[in-house]
Structure formats: C-alpha cells, structure tokens
C-alpha cells in the first residue's frame, strides 16, 4: 500500500508543477503584463519602467522559478489590482467557494444516489426514465442559464429566496442546487450502472436465497459494493466544483475564489491568477489522489495497476 | 455563444416576470440600493481608475472647483474664487467653515498636503495624468493657497473640478491610501459607513454638508453591492431588492423600457468615442502600405455608414462623430471635413490609389465585437478584405505602441475631461500611440496645449483637428451611450459624463 501511495503522491506533485508552469507561460502569451499594469495613459517609457520594476524583462524561466520558490513558502506576492497580499485576498474568498463546494457535492450525492438505486431496481421503469431525463438535462443545461431560471422562479415569481448575494444561508440554496446539479448526472448514472451489475452477481442471489429481506439485500449487500466507484467519482467532482464554480459565483454574485479568478484574468492580475490556478489545481489533484487511495484501500486489485 | 444565450435569457426573464406585481423600492427605509458591475480595487479615488470609483469620489469628496454638468460652467466648491498669479501659479481662496466627516476643519493645510502627496510620482497615484501637471502647493494663509503647475497648463481648472479632490491632511498622513480605502473620510455630501473591499459599500447622508454647488443630498442611505452579471442585476431589480442599475446593454434596456409601468429607463451619451486608427505613418511591416495613401484613408471614411451603426447597434443618445474628440470638449471644433456614407466614392478612391480590386489587411479590436464586425462588413463591401482579430486590451495596446496594427477599432473616454487636449493631444503628439506623426499637427497642438488664452487655444485646436480630418488620419465614428434603469420610486436625471450623482437623486 505504501509504495502505491508514494507513487501516486509523486505523480500528483509532478502534475501540480506542470499545471503551474503551463499556466505561467500562457499568462505571458495573453498580453504584455507591463502594458496592462501601466494603464491606459502610460507612455512607452512608463511601460519600460514598470517592466523593470516588476522584473518582466528577465527570462520567463527565472521568473517562474522565483515565483515558485516564494509560493512554496506561502508567499504569493501582492495583487496588482487590490494592492493586497494575494494569500489574504484568497483566504477571504475561499470560504465562500468551500461552503459552496461542500453543499454542492452533498446535494449531488443526496439526490443522485437514491435516484440511481431506484433506477437500478426497476430498469426501464418510469423512475428510470425520469432519472435519465434529469441527468441528460443536467449535463446539457449551461449552469448560468439554469441559475437564472431558478432566480426567475424562486426569487422573482415565488419570492421565496433572495436572488443573489451571500449574507445568509438562504442565499446559498440556489447556488448549491445549480452547482450540485452539474455533478449529479455522472454520480447517478454510475450508481445505477454499479447497482445493475452488482444486483446480477452471485452473492446477491446467495443473499436472497438465504432469505435476507429486500431492503437488507439492497443496502447492506448491493449498495455497499456498488458505491465504491461512486465515492471516488464524488471526490473528483468535489475538486472540480471548487475550481469550477466561477459561473455560479458570478451569476449569484457570491464573491468567492472562482469569481476572483475570472475577474483577475480580465484584469491581468498575474499574481492572483497564478495563485488561484495553483490552488484550484491542487484541490483537483488532492481529491484525485484521495480518490485513488480510497479506491486502492477499498479494492486491493487497484493497487497493482 | 455566451452572449447569444444571455440575450435569450434576458428575454425569458423579461417575459416571465411581466405578469408579477411591481416590486417596491426600499423607500420606507430611505435606502437606495445600487449595483456595481465591477469590483472596485480601492475606494481611495487616487488609487482606482474605474467609473465606479469616480462615482464614489464625487459622493464622498469635493474638489476645489465644480463644473456644472449641464452648462459646463465652473463655480467654486471648496474654493470660492481663483486667479492665475502668473502663467504657472493659481491662487485660490478657500471656503471657510467646512468640516470633514471626522470633524476636522478644512483649511489650506489640507489642500497643500493633498496636492503635495498626489503630485509626487513615487506615491503611485494610479492615473498619473490626473495629477502630474501639478508641481506643488503652498499655503499663503489659513484660507488661501497657491498651486504651481509644472508647465503652462490651461486645463488646470477642469482637472481641479474633476479628479483632484481634497483629503484631510492629518488623517491621510496617518492611514495612507489603504486606510483611506477602508475608512474613507472627505467633505462630500455622503459619508462612508461600511466598506467590504470590492463587494459592498454603504453611504449615509452627511448632515453638515456645506452649501455646495453639488446641492444637498436628499436620500438618506445608499447601499451599493457588486453584482457582476447584468441578468442577475435585472432579477434583483424585479424582485425589488435593487433600485438602480446602470451601464445596462441596449437590448436589455429596450426590453425593460417596454415594460413601461415598473421601471424608468433613461439613456445618456458618454464622452467615449469609437474610431478607426490607421497606420498612416507607415510604422507597420505592411508593404506596400495602403494606409499611407490619403485616398485609401478617405475611402475607409466613406465606406462606413455611421448613422446605421448608431441607429441599429449603439442606439440611445449616441451620435455620429466626425472629430477626434468629443463635441462638448473645449476646443473640439466641429467645422471639419465630413465623410458621409458613399461606398461608390470609396471604391473610386481605392481605384485611384491603385487598388481597383481592394486589398487585404489585418483588422484588430479589443471590445464591442458586434460593432467591429459591422465595420468589417462595410469595409468588405468596398473591396477591403479584413482579417479580423479580437485581442485583449493590453495585447492590442502593445501592438499599437509598436505600430504593428495597420487598422484597428479603438475607443477613448477622455476620463470625462471636458477638454480636447484629453483626446487630440493624447494621440497626435508623436507619442507611441500616434499612428500618424504629422509635424504640422504636433506644432499646432503644442501651441494649443500650452496657451492660457482660450481664444488662441480654440484657434489652434481647430487648425489641428481640421488637418486631422482633412487628411483622414482616423475614421472617427460615434459616441457611446449608457442606460440607467431605476424603479419608479426613484427620480434621477443622468448627466452626459457617465457619473452617477446620488446628491441629485430623490424619491418620487
């Protein structure tokens, strides 16, 4: 088990480094950071001065190395836009994104797993059809559009929920549904497929033969085995949600890390974008890693691969 | 793609909501709720460069002078009178009895400290142009100061009535720009009671506001939230949790206006102008470079139906513009060469220039893709094939500074400074963004920029602007506009400078 974990860990670190390096290079291709910093009225000399001041005139590899060295020590520099330390800026906003991510994945699991089980118990029944419809719709709908539809329905027509903002728990209900709904289809389909496979296996027949109740067979024997891949999928989805809530945060005016990333790209705020990309990819990598380890722990066959 | 979706959604929003009852504004609590689209980096007005920041600046602080947005006349605000002692020294008498929000008296010391701080380049004021014309300030007595300019600077009065506002000396020295951003203190009609950086600002009426030309504030509280998505802002408006939104896109504003009884939609022009910049000086690597030929530049000017662009895309209070400056700006002469839409003439001119079958050029833009594409199709219609490229602002700016963009769609807002120097002198004085490099124009602009005689300034700006249009260096096209939507409870008449003035807002 330990060699497996170490191997995966090494791989995760390499992926993180690669992501940060690629994003660092891409940012330099997207426009002259010195020109963006110097602003609309700057002359050519102003821009040259800014270039020297921020060290943009040095080779990119050197700049990357220096940034990485500082980042490892937890220092992500100062935001060009807010003139505040990036780490404090992000810390302020990460809580919103984390809350949203945890609520989103919980919502997805609480709806997708029961639906998947129900669909597997009666394949091709009405429940199965409804579940299929829901999952196709979830994958197909752009989340900003779904978000706006919810706002129209619950905030404007019915007046039950506030349209946007983050000042109470009620503000999180719609964003949670939108974010969770995006992850729901995959989890549900996997639960259904897993259950169908398990339900046809020998030991379920054995369980039934020895007279175990249907509920007991379903939840004690079948679901426990079918849920293994779902757990790892959920972990991956969770990583995806933490980095991918940009649109949801923007629609619901939640000032989280995703929205900060989106705005910082538009503002060419390199230190902030860099730090956020690293943090988001770390989330993704950590959750992937956890999923791998979890899988290996649950299923010894995975360890050898 | 995303835009298309947005529009459909806006329509869906508008249709689905039209049936519900009108939402009530928060008039009962005397609180006006406003949305900002962009996050403001710092409330300290010297350390942000966005429109949202200017709005707060005008509410929280005062300038020495005030320009009436309707008549464009200057009157005293924190100063009561002013006089040029010599070409580079302006003496101002200050208003007595004015107090800052924290109780400090406003005196000459505050003016001296503010000017001396912001004028120093190393203090890093974000928009240097707003302040770098000032050399220093000195106190004559408690209520008399002198401001020295670096060069002869006739636009000083305009700047003192715009971006230069007065800060409390002692407090600012103590807390600096970041402290000022979190706990702003000024003399303005509204004081700030809450700041969540970038997200939420609460202003309250300043009861002891002096007898200012801005007028006395009427609405008790202003609550500003940052809501990035326009559709969400509209939803908030529908649900009654916002009273005012602005910078609303034309198509959505139209839908809201059609709903009649719930909202007031008003439109005002802004100082921003859209124009085509051409590589007349031949700095790009194009060979042969068609833009060096005046006939080609004239052809491009003739090829575009500006009125159609205004009527169908920009709409509202936008106007066709023929000058490289906004018509209301001081010195922006309007007796210039106009190139009304004439595609046949454009083709003839191209043929005369040796391009009977047109030519192919790269065409760049950084915003308003729809406008740029429409312009592109006008150019295609007279035989100019465009290789259209949409870039980030900073990337296109870099190309333009190096002179590598042969043809680009540009816009300029002059920072709402009502003086032609803010635009003509910005682009035609052989700076890195000058794609024309006309010595004659440079000479005339130098005279106009550095004369204190208004008549002389008008004369030389006219000469320069007439030559620029005669030579068709640019293709100026149109002015921009912006839409303001308020609930029926709010009474507000927007001004042409795109600054929200809370002081002139009242409840109906």
Image (cartoon, coloured by chain):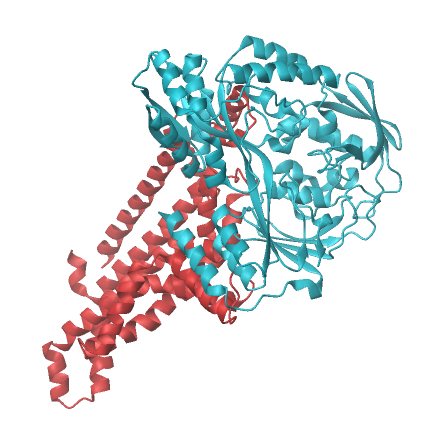
Chain colours: A red, B cyan
Give residue B28's position: percent from left, percent from top: 70, 66
Q: Is residue A61 above or below residue A288?
A: above
Residue at horizontal 35%, vertical 60%? A238
Side of B319 relative to A98 (left or right): right
Q: Is residue A56 visible?
A: no
Give residue B160's position: percent from left, percent from top: 74, 31
Tell me the quarter of the picture where residue B271 sits.
Answer: top right
Q: Residue furthest bottom?
A: A211
Nearest to the observer: residue B467 or residue B223: B467
Side of B354 relative to B137 (left or right): left
Side of B103 relative to B462 (left or right): right
Q: Residue furthest left?
A: A202
Nearest to the observer: residue B315 or residue B407: B315
Quarter of the C terminus of chain B within the rendering: bottom right
Side of A209 relative to A16 (left or right): left
Nearest to the observer: residue B37 or residue B22: B22
Give residue B135's position: percent from left, percent from top: 73, 22
Q: Is residue B309 visible?
A: yes
Nearest to the observer: residue A262 or residue B368: B368
Tell me the quarter of the picture where residue B82 sits.
Answer: top right
Q: Is residue B288 above or below residue B89?
A: above
- The number of numbered badges drawn on the structure is 0
Give residue A136's position: percent from left, percent from top: 26, 64
């Amino acid at each position: 088990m330990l060699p497996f974990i170490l191997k995966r860990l090494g791989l995760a670190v390499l992926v993180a480094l690669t992501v940060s390096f690629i994003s660092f290079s891409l940012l330099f291709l997207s426009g002259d950071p010195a020109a963006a910093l110097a602003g609309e009225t700057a002359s050519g000399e102003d821009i040259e001065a800014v270039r020297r001041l921020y060290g943009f005139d040095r080779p990119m590899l050197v700049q990357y190395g220096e940034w990485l060295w500082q980042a490892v020590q937890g220092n992500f520099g100062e935001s060009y836009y807010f003139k505040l330390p990036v780490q404090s800026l992000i810390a302020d906003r990460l809580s919103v994104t984390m809350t949203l991510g945890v609520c989103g994945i919980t919502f997805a699991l609480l709806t997708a797993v029961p639906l998947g089980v129900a669909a597997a118990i009666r394949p091709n029944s009405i429940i199965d059809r409804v579940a299929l419809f829901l999952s196709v719709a979830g994958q197909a709908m752009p989340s900003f559009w779904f978000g706006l539809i919810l706002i129209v329905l619950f905030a404007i027509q019915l007046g039950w929920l506030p349209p946007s903002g983050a000042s109470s728990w009620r503000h999180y209900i719609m964003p949670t549904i939108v974010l969770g709904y995006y992850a729901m289809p995959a989890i549900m389909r996997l639960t259904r497929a897993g259950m169908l496979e398990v339900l046809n296996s020998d030991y379920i027949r054995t369980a039934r033969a020895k007279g175990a109740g249907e509920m007991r067979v379903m939840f004690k024997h079948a679901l426990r085995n079918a849920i293994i891949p779902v757990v790892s999928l959920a972990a991956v989805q969770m990583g995806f949600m933490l980095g991918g809530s940009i649109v949801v945060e923007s629609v619901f005016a939640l000032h989280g890390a995703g929205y900060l990333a989106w705005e910082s790209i538009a503002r060419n705020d390199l230190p902030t974008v860099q730090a956020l990309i690293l943090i988001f990819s770390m989330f993704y990598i950590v959750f992937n890693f956890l999923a791998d380890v979890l899988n290996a722990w649950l299923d010894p066959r995975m360890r050898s691969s | 793609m995303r835009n298309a979706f947005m529009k459909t959604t806006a329509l869906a929003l508008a249709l689905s909501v039209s049936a519900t009852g009108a939402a009530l504004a928060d008039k009962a609590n005397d609180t006006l709720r406003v949305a900002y689209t962009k996050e403001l980096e710092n409330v300290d007005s010297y350390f942000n460069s966005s429109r949202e920041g200017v709005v707060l600046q005008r509410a929280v602080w005062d300038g020495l002078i005030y320009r009436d947005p309707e008549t464009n006349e200057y009157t005293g605000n924190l100063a009561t009178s002013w006089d040029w002692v010599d070409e580079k020294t302006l003496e101002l008498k200050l208003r007595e009895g004015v107090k800052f929000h924290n109780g400090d008296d406003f005196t000459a010391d505050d003016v001296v400290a503010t000017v001396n701080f912001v004028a120093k380049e190393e203090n890093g004021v974000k928009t240097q142009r707003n302040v770098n014309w000032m050399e220093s300030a000195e106190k004559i007595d408690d209520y008399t100061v002198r401001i020295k300019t670096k060069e002869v600077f006739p636009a000083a009065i305009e700047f003192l009535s715009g971006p230069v506002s007065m800060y409390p000396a002692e407090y600012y020295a103590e807390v600096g720009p970041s402290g000022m951003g979190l706990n702003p203190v000024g003399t303005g009609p509204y004081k700030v009671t809450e700041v969540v950086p970038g997200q939420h600002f609460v202003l309250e009426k300043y009861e002891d506001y002096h007898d200012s030309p801005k007028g006395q504030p009427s609405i008790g509280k202003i609550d500003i939230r940052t809501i990035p998505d326009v559709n969400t802002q509209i939803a908030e408006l529908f649900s009654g949790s916002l009273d005012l939104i602005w910078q609303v896109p034309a198509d959505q504003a139209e839908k809201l206006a059609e709903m009649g009884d719930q909202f007031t939609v008003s439109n005002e022009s802004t100082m921003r102008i859209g124009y085509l910049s051409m590589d007349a000086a031949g700095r790009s690597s194009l060979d042969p470079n068609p833009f060096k030929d005046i006939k080609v530049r004239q052809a491009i000017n003739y090829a575009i139906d500006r009125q159609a662009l205004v009527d169908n895309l920009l709409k509202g209070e936008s106007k066709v513009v023929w000058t490289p400056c906004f018509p209301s700006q001081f010195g922006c002469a309007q007796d210039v060469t106009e190139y009304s839409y004439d595609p046949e003439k454009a083709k003839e001119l191209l043929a005369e220039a040796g391009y009977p079958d047109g030519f192919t050029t790269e065409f760049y833009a950084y915003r308003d893709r729809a406008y740029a594409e429409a312009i592109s199709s006008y150019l295609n219609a007279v035989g100019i094939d465009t290789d259209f490229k949409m870039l980030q602002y900073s990337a296109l700016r870099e190309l333009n500074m190096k002179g590598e963009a042969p043809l680009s769609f540009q816009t300029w807002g002059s920072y709402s400074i009502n003086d032609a120097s803010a635009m003509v002198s910005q682009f035609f004085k052989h700076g890195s963004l000058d794609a024309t490099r006309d010595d004659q124009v440079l000479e005339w602009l130098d005279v106009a920029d550095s004369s204190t005689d208004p008549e002389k300034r008008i004369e030389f700006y006219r000469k320069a602007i007439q030559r620029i249009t005669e030579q068709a260096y640019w293709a100026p096209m149109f002015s921009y506009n912006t839409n303001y939507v308020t609930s029926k409870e709010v009474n507000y008449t927007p001004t042409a400078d795109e600054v929200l003035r809370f002081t002139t807002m009242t409840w109906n």
